[in-house]
Amino acid sequence: MHILETKLARLQEIVGSLESVVLGFSGGADSTLLLKVSLDVLGRTKVLAVTFHSEIQSENELTHALQLAQSMDAQHLVIEGNELQNDLFVTNPPDRCYYCKLRRYRQLLSLAAERQFRNVIDGSNYSDLADYRPGIKALLELGIKSPLQEAQLTKDDVRALSFKLDLPTWNRPAQACLASRIPYGQRITALALQQVAKAEKVLSDAGFSPCRVRHHGEVARIEVPRQDLVRLFQQPGIDDIVRAIKATGFRYVAVDLEGYRTGSLNELLEPNE
């Protein structure tokens, strides 16, 4: 049996053992694959997908998750996130994600108990273990299951299986929360999150995807894939792009010559953080 098929069989076995699940559902490639397998293995009544509506995610992501869950005929619930009311989060320490995951998944555990679902699961994949992911600590403390990790499905595996299962998210770019664009120690505000979301939409509308806009106070630091840097600088409408990004509240617009990469703000962390 092909190794990918073996991993899928293992994933199905793991999910089947959980009996009924509440799934933290973002609409990204990982959680969509996990939702698909959960529905196939457990059936619709035994799966509840939950999406958080929060200022740390763009409205486009919520719309995408709603449409996706509906197309999959999944039970789906949207609940409000309240991260900006948590000072441990908004002060933006390096373990910011820990406090976010802790609060969110406590809510999901309460919801699961209330609705009599046996387990809460999330879509972390095996590749996430190689990155700086303080949120994983919160999941472990709370006893949240991560079936993709347990089945040793890497990000590439997730995309390959998603393609095989005809899921539209197979090539969807990673969509980390907007707070990940703000350097550690710089306070997270609703205004800063809105600036980032609007500035990234400017780039996306101009044909640059994936992209990131890192918020350095008055400076917007743009990341686009390195192969797109020449196209960005030669873009006939680059002046319009700059003006539109400045219109969100930034005074300066800079381009990162290293290009797009996830977690670039983690590069400043000490190895033990």
Image (cartoon, rainbow, N blue to C red):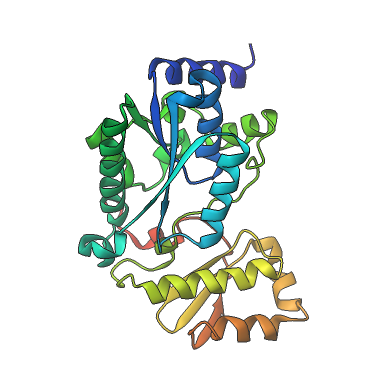
Between 36 and 226, the one lying in front of the other is 36
- Give the residue at x 49% y 71%: 196
Q: Which quadrant is home to the N terminus?
A: top right
Residue 131 picture quarter: top left
Q: Residue furthest right?
A: 236
Whether residue 256 appears in this view of the structure is no
Q: Residue at x 56, y 15 (%)?
A: 6
Write down the quadrant of residue 69 in the picture. top right
For the image, the number of numbered tags is 0
- Relative to 264, residue 186 above or below: below
Across and down, in percent, residue 263 comes to 45, 56
Task: Give percent across and percent down for residue 28.
Answer: 54, 45
In-image side of 102 versus 177 (left or right): left
Image spot of residue 224 (x, y percent)? 62, 65
Q: Position of residue 101 (x, y in %)?
A: 31, 47
Q: In this orientation, which residue lies closer to the viewer: 39 or 225?
A: 39
> Is residue 203 left or right of 90 when viewed as pictured?
right
- The reply, left or right, for residue 128 in relation to residue 167 is left
Q: Which residue is more in the foreground, 18 or 111?
A: 111
Report if residue 29 is visible in the image.
yes
Residue shown at the point (53%, 26%) measured from the top left: 39
Q: Is residue 57 above or below residue 74?
A: below
Residue at x 72%, y 71% (from the top left corner): 230
